[in-house]
Image: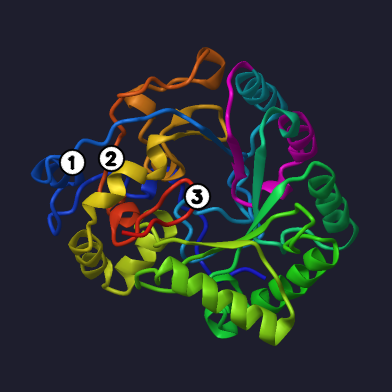
Amino acid sequence: MTNAVDQTENISTRYPNANSLIVEPFDRTLFQHNLTLTRGETTTLQINVGLLCNLSCKHCHLEAGPLRDQLMDAKTVDQVVDYATRNSFETIDITGGAPELNPRMENLIRKLAPLTSELMVRTNLIALEGAAWGKYISLCKGNRVIIIVSLPSLNEAQTDAQRGEGAFRRIIAALKKLNALGYGIEGTGLALNLASNPVGAFMNASQIQAEKRFHEILLKKWGINFTKLYNFNNVPLGRFRRWLQSKGELDNYLIKLAGLFNPCSISSIMCRTSVSINWQGYLFDCDFNIASEQYLSGSKIHVSQMDGLPACGLPVAVGEHCYACTAGAGFTCGGTITD
């Protein structure tokens, strides 16, 4: 089931990267700390295969949902595979929307799996059901795909408030099935990672403490094992930004994020070592810059026009949404950092 959220607005209504008068522009904050945010060596390729999703989650920065028809087509899939073949990536990360709803996913997984040591696919676990779900998971297992499951909270009411009525129980049931297939079980080599976002205008908890708590409660209450937890702040873009505005909380949330700016997060932030491709095949520094329509190096470059990796030292496009990635523990390619 989906939340009762209006899905008619398109990408251009997401308040792209206009800085609020409430907080300092992010680039000015960097300057005040004598910092620059530039690209390092690119090791991760992130591919957003489309905005179609079975859910309309309140925290979604891309405003994905059942009425979004933007999907990566077969030609673009081939161009992305060609780009991955021409270059070397330690990690390839497939995201959406709900990636499994793109009918080209089987082709994409089979062709990308041999090209990297870590092929990751993100999922809400309830976009597919029955035989379609089983076929998809078998495809992932056969290609040793790392599955990353979005589970906002261990509280059923909170998860359902963000994802829709009944979502929590369906996710728990699917996690049990993944464990039965070997995912998340030590020694199988089948990694099952969880991604958690706060439900509401709150900051993420300590990475170490949150992972320990998730392990303990999931195992004790439902007998579920997983590999690791990624713990992220919600980014003030898209549907989450509009939700904050509707509650009169946008200014307070931005002030809270900016007040927790952590200079130590800059060296490890994920946009320094990843390149993101949107469903049309254009290049960005990160998935959040896809939402804010800030192209890589300020130019609309298509993956078919890009031979090599983005050059080290290129400036990363920034906006006030970057405060979410640098507040407290921050975002990194592998989850959150500790300081």
Contact? badges 1 and 2 (CB < 8 Å): yes
Which residue shows up at 55% across the image and 53% down it?
64
Question: Is residue 201 found inside the magenta-colored segment of the image?
Answer: no
Task: Kindly identify the residue that appears in the image at 36 percent across and 45 percent down.
Answer: 269
CB under 8 Å between discs 2 and 3: no
146 left or right of 188 in image: left
Percent of width and height locating residue 165 = 63, 78
Asked if residue 153 shows in the view, the reply is no
Label 1 sits on what residue type?
Asp
From the image, tell me which residue sits under label 2: 318
Is residue 96 magenta-colored? yes
- Which of label 3 and label 1 is nearer to you? 3
Q: Which residue is mark 1?
A: 27
> Which badge, 2 or 3, comes first in the chain's sequence?
2
The residue positioned 79% from the left and 34% from the top of the image is 110
Q: What secondary structure is marked by label 1? A: helix
Q: Which residue is mark 3?
A: 334
Over which residues does the magenta segment extend? 86-112
